[in-house]
Image (tube, helix red, strand yellow):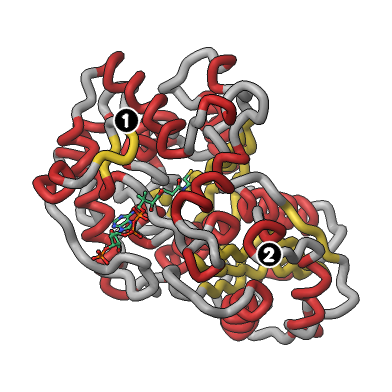
Amino acid sequence: MTRASVVGVGMTEFGVHEKRLAELFADAAFPAFDDAGITGDDVDAFYFGNAMSGLSENDTHLAPKIATHIGIPGVPCQRYEDACATSSNAFKNAVEAVEAGVHDVVLVGGVERCTPETGLDTPEMTRVFASASHREYEQPTGLTFPGVFALLTKRHMHEHGTTEEQLAEVAVKNHYHGSLNPRAHFGKETTVEEVLDGPVVADPFRLMDCCPFSDGASAAIVVSDDLADSYSDPVDVTGVGHGTDCVPISDKEQLSATQAARDAADEAYSQAGVSADEVDFVEVHDCFTGAEVLATEALGLFEDGEGGEAAAEGRTRVDGEVPVNPSGGLKAKGHPIGATGTAQITELVEQIRGEAGERQLDDAEVGLAHNLGGDSATTIVSVMEARA
Ligand code: COA
């Protein structure tokens, strides 16, 4: 069943930007308007994602400010903050709003600045990001986000024998995909040897196992199903699932199973009426290489414990049986956290329309986006399909 359709997308390059948040978001929103063939006058509402503008720019009431800046003053605006799942949650709510008939045409998107251009260097930004962990139980231990995902991945290695070489293969694959994506933060390829020779960030992750701090913005135009055919190239949203797990990590039942992703995927598959083996390609939240392995298993693409081996065998490459992160993923495309969710939606739309350039997949009718926040406690899974 079609819940809504996306009729326009836009995103900036991910990387280092000097522009401030409002200007940066405009560079994604205007291309999305152009792609949909609309102007700001056609927009009924603005669903906006940003996680940390208070810290990066001391600028917190951003949605109406940005609406004014991009020429849609007065439309109902709301801001979402769910750590790295921020703009996916905005997307979920935009889909629900058009499905319910509350709005017809919604601008949804996100923007973030995380690089030292903000004035915050890697240690300071690492501390800012760590604010998404448990304030009383985890932050006093000095736990960082590389540390959070290292804990989950170490458990997976212990339970299933996943190796550092298999994790390195995920980085090699995503850097290769990123080399095909002109908007990627990192456009250069790497090798297993280079990954394994890198400095340790949080065992088992080395430099190349980690996503970078990035700046960037992304946007999409979501419309109701009954309006979609009046636009030139709609792509249908057929399922959006939302799962939530316990925080802190010590309260989770299984560390390596990422239960919120499993719940979100079940809900999204059930709404869409598709199973994991009917999905042609996925964009997953590979903030660290281990996170991609956990995600591919939680989505049911591989049996539990087989995600690392599947990556090492090339089954997740653009030419493999189920391409994972054809965009380069967070690892190579980059991760401006509030913009990541709708950037995944942008990749799904471009692949399904056949507009993905060098990284275009042969078979891209059904795509899935998996975007998590915090220690994976918030996860949103969206299924999109070519319009019948
Ligand atoms: N992947 C590949 N290369 C990277 C990289 C990454 N994640 N981060 C930096 N680099 C490269 C830089 O381009 C630079 O290359 P150069 O010397 O050729 O110019 C070099 O590595 C050093 O860059 P620098 O910016 O000094 O790295 P850093 O040590 O300050 O930060 C990390 C590297 C991995 C520690 C940092 O990017 C990080 O913490 N990433 C994780 C962010 C995070 O937790 N996100 C939330 C996920 S839930």
Spot occupied by residue 367 in the image (x, y as percentages of width and height): 45, 52
Instruction: Name the quadrant where ligand 1 sits.
Output: bottom left
Residue at 81% over, 84% down: 41
Spot occupied by residue 239 in the image (x, y as percentages of width and height): 60, 45
Instruction: Identify which amino acid the numbered label 1 is placed on.
Output: Phe
Q: Is residue 138 left or right of residue 358?
A: right
Residue 139 occupies which quadrant of the picture? top right
Mark 1 vs mark 2, foreground winner is 2
CB of mark 2 near ligand 1 (< 8 Å): no
Residue at 50% over, 56% down: 385
Compared to residue 283, the image places residue 185 above or below, namely below
Spot occupied by residue 164 in the image (x, y as percentages of width and height): 20, 32
Q: Name the one closer to the observer, 155 or 196.
A: 196
What is the tally of numbered marks visible in this picture? Answer: 2
Q: Please say whether residue 387 is visible from this viewpoint.
A: no
Q: Is residue 50 left or right of residue 72?
A: left
Q: CA distance from mark 1 to mark 2?
A: 32 Å
Spot occupied by residue 184 in the image (x, y as percentages of width and height): 36, 68
Compared to residue 295, the image places residue 233 above or below, namely below
SS for callout 2 = strand
Name the residue beneath numbered marker 1: 302
Question: Quick check: marks 1 and 2 in contact, CB under 8 Å?
Answer: no
Q: Is residue 250 left or right of residue 292?
A: right
> How packed is label 2: few (under 14 Cα within 10 Å), some, or many (20 or more)?
many
Residue at 32% over, 23% down: 154
Name the residue beneath numbered marker 2: 108
